[in-house]
Amino acid sequence: MNEVVPNKKEYDPRMHSAEHILNQTMVRMFNCGRAFSAHIEKKKSKCDYHFERNLTAEEIIQIENKVNLVIKSNLPIQEKMLNREEAGKIVSLSRLPEDAGDKVRIIAVGDYDLCPCSGVHALTTSEIGEFKIISTDCSNGILRVRFKINQMLS
């Protein structure tokens, strides 16, 4: 929850929603944890993961395919307000500041992803558009994934 909503001119709720799906896809495929750092903008975004190598071309295609499958599934993206104790039973609160209060805002992407978040999101995954990885690189145990979203999927 250390996220800061960027300048509204550069912010796109669809891109932020795509980040949630990418994070859960990385967790499921590689068990690497969610991005520890992200920069989300309208034209392109990036996520950094603790990872020991770069992704292969085949892995990039697999990630794109999985993320786009979730997007096409038209899952609802919903907000839930839980007290800190309840939230801690279902999500990691490690990035939540101690002074964040007792209520925690949880974003659920259907039954695919669940995490604390303060950002603005699309209403459903089908609003996001096509997810595309622009590039990846790995240095000193940090994998950077740069991505964008194109027009709506048909």
Image (cartoon, grey):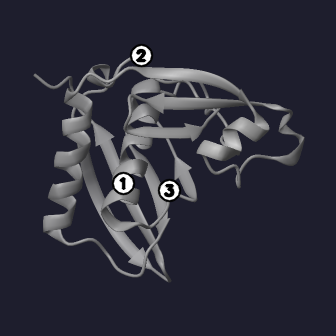
Give the vertical position of 5 relative to 31 (above or below).
Answer: above
Which residue is the extreme one toward the top? Answer: 123
Q: Tag on residue 71?
A: none
> Closer to the camera, 108 or 49?
108
The residue at the point 32 percent across, 24 percent down is: 75
Q: Mark 3 belongs to which amino acid?
A: Arg
> Closer to the camera, 154 or 69?
69
> For the residues marked 1 and 2, what is the alpha-carbon distance in whole angstroms?
23 Å
The residue at the point 46 percent across, 55 percent down is: 47
The residue at the point 31 percent across, 41 percent down is: 148
Q: Which residue is mark 1?
A: 146
**Left or right of 154, for residue 21:** right
> In the image, residue 58 lies at what x, y percent?
13, 66
Q: Tag on residue 123?
A: 2
Q: Quadrant of the C terminus?
A: top left
Q: Are marks 3 and 1 in contact (CB under 8 Å)?
A: no
> In the image, residue 40 lies at what x, y percent?
49, 41
Q: Quadrant of the N terminus?
A: top right
Q: Which residue is mark 3?
A: 34
> Closer to the camera, 102 or 8?
102
Q: How many marks?
A: 3
Foreground tag (3 vs 1): 3
